[in-house]
Image (cartoon, rainbow, N blue to C red):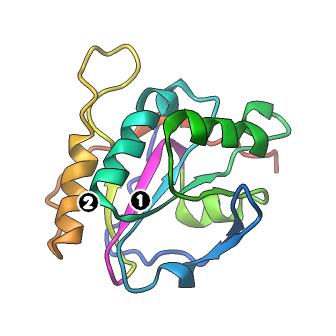
């Protein structure tokens, strides 16, 4: 069953984090201070992510915001979301941005991530400016994959403007939390 994003309040500060990428380079909040940042909770196994992954890579490359993907799923229970498989995904999707591993799941919880994909766009002050969908397309709904919702949000934030509301929640597979 599909899960929707929790719609964290706009203006929420970017949570602190220190996460390794697929090459073990650790990224922190401080690495992104002073510029907008797009955070995408993603994984390899989810059909909702697979549906948008190539278009996401193209969108980010065309607009140029700092971007990270984070996988917070339990890779023991979902081996398709283990780092080697995430590397395959990043190559397949043409992602040029860091793919971070949240093995403890504490970062996913701090962001209040709920689904994959789940998008969090922060302004230059690292305050939440957009949380919502890539566009209206989901696997099998027949709507075109455009990225228009996220594109408009990124363009507004890069221009220093607020993102007009309402924001449509993202929809996807639930984050695969460990028990407890």
> How far is mark 1 from mark 2, CA to CA?
11 Å
Q: Residue at x 21, y 42 (%)?
A: 148
Q: Callout 1: 10 Å neighbours few (<14), some, many (20+)?
A: many
Q: Which residue is mark 1?
A: 120
Q: Is residue 106 magenta?
A: no
Q: Residue at x 48, y 53 (%)?
A: 40
Determine whether the residue tagged by mark 2 lies in a helix, strand or loop.
Answer: helix
Q: Is residue 167 visible?
A: no
Q: Earlier in the sequence, mark 1 or mark 2?
A: 1
Residue 4, horizontal then vertical, whole percent:
44, 39
Residue 53, horizontal then vertical, whole percent:
46, 36
Determine whether the residue tagged by mark 1 lies in a helix, strand or loop.
Answer: strand
Circle 1 or circle 2, nearest the eye: 2
Residue 7, horizontal then vertical, whole percent:
38, 55
- Start and end of the magenta stretch? 114-125
For the N terminus, which image quadrant?
top right
Q: Which residue is mark 2?
A: 154
């Amino acid at each position: 069953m599909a899960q929707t994003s929790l719609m964290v309040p706009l203006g929420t500060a970017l949570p602190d984090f220190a996460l390794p990428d697929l090459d073990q380079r650790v990224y922190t909040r401080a690495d992104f201070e002073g510029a907008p940042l797009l955070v995408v909770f993603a994984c390899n196994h989810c059909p909702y992510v697979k549906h948008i992954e190539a278009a996401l890579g193209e969108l980010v490359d065309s607009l140029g915001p700092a971007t990270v993907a984070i996988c917070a799923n339990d890779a023991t229970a979902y081996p398709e979301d283990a780092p080697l498989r995430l590397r395959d995904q990043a190559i397949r999707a043409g992602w040029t941005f860091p793919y971070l591993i949240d093995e403890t799941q504490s970062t996913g919880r701090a962001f209040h991530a709920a689904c994959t994909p789940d998008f969090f766009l922060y302004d230059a002050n690292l305050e939440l400016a957009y949380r919502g969908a890539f566009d209206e397309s989901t696997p099998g709904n027949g709507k075109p994959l455009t990225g228009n919702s996220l594109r408009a949000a990124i363009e507004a934030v890069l221009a220093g403007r607020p993102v007009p509301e309402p924001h449509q929640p993202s929809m996807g597979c639930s984050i695969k939390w460990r028990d407890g």
